[in-house]
Image (cartoon, rainbow, N blue to C red):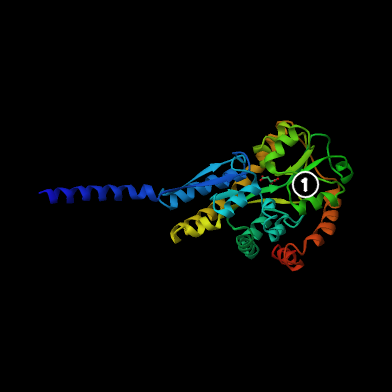
Amino acid sequence: MKFRKNVLLSFVAAASLIAAAPAALATTFKMAIGDAAGGTQWELGSSFAKNLEQKTGGKHKVDLFPNGQLGSEEDTVNNAAMGVLDFSILAVNNITPFSPTVGLLTMPYVIQSADDAKKLTQGEVGKELTENTIRDAGVRIVGWAYSGFRVLTNSKKPVTTLDDLKGLVIRVPKNEIMIASYQAWGVNPTPMSWSETFTGLQQRVVDGQDNPYITVSAMKFYEVQKYVTNLRYIFSLEPLVVSESVFKDQKPEVQKAILDAGHEATEHSFKYLLETEEKIKKDLVARGLQITEPADGEKEWIAKATTTVWPKFYKSIGGKEKLDRALQTLGR
Ligand code: MLT
């Protein structure tokens, strides 16, 4: 009888362990987001989290930490590479220091439309850059936020010509291609990390910066900026990256769920941009921002940046042929 009671107890214990197993296997991943909630990064991240949870029957959830809570965008790449952070969404220009060939996507005036951005990221070029990023930076790109062109904002004066730019202190990311673009336009910009940018603008350490309309709105830059120049020099792409070591630790079906969730979130991001950008632009005007077009169809800006900057960075992006191939993909 005693024996039977023990067997029963072991059976109950085993049954409760089995019942607890799904909970024990469940994972809540952490995702760092550089921007405030409400922008394109947030849209991509929330869509990804929802998709992943659905695809894994609720076993894998993602907690989003916006506003640089988990460190600067550059720190999140290092942390993900070391496997102490699972996911991060950040601007592609802040990955380039770790994986220089990705600089192809920040070469001025290469991407001229949202469709161009989609073609490059989702075709052969995007595939190759994803592989390079795993190799160089220890992170895997599994999705893209399409955020729109980076427009120039400042607190001092309307800017339409390169002459107008003189005397302004412009914040740029710590990205050599962007620094070189402003130098080609005749000013020495101030490299500053993204997490310090709002305070830098507020305290007038810098007069201006560039980022897409949706980001300007999400970050409430309208509180500290007055003038916008509708530049089209860089189309902002913001990859969702997963730590390669975290990815490798997942079962094949979870890896597939991550890749599929990222793909669907990318599609969502593209739609979100097309549906939202114009509305946000109008809202920014209603909040007092003055938007001007660059003079003469941006000709001078384009000529200076492409003739000076492109040749300087052929080597770091893997050779002139990489840029030629991208332009060919875009039908130019
Ligand atoms: C930057 O300017 O550093 C980035 O584009 C900001 C961002 O992640 O939105």
Residue nearest the observer in this picture, 58 or 172: 172
Provide the secondary structure element on which disc 1 rests.
loop
Above or below residue 13? Residue 132 is: below
Q: Nearer the viewer, residue 265 or 17?
A: 17
Residue 221 image point, x, y percent: 70, 35
Give the residue furthest to the right.
Answer: 163
Q: Is residue 90 left or right of residue 308?
A: left
Residue 133's x, y, as percent?
A: 63, 60
Tally of marks? 1
Ligand 1 position by quadrant: top right
Query: What's the amino acid at mark 1?
Result: Leu
Is any part of residue 270 visible from this angle? no
The answer to whether 198 appears left or right of 161 in the picture is: left
Furthest residue in direction left, as rendered: 1
Tell me the quarter of the image containing the C terminus: bottom right
Q: Residues within 10 Å of mark 1 (few under 14, many from 20)?
A: many
Q: Position of residue 126 (x, y in %)?
A: 63, 61
Residue 104 appears in the figure: yes
Query: To which residue does mark 1 refer?
Result: 231
Q: Is residue 14 above or below residue 154?
A: below
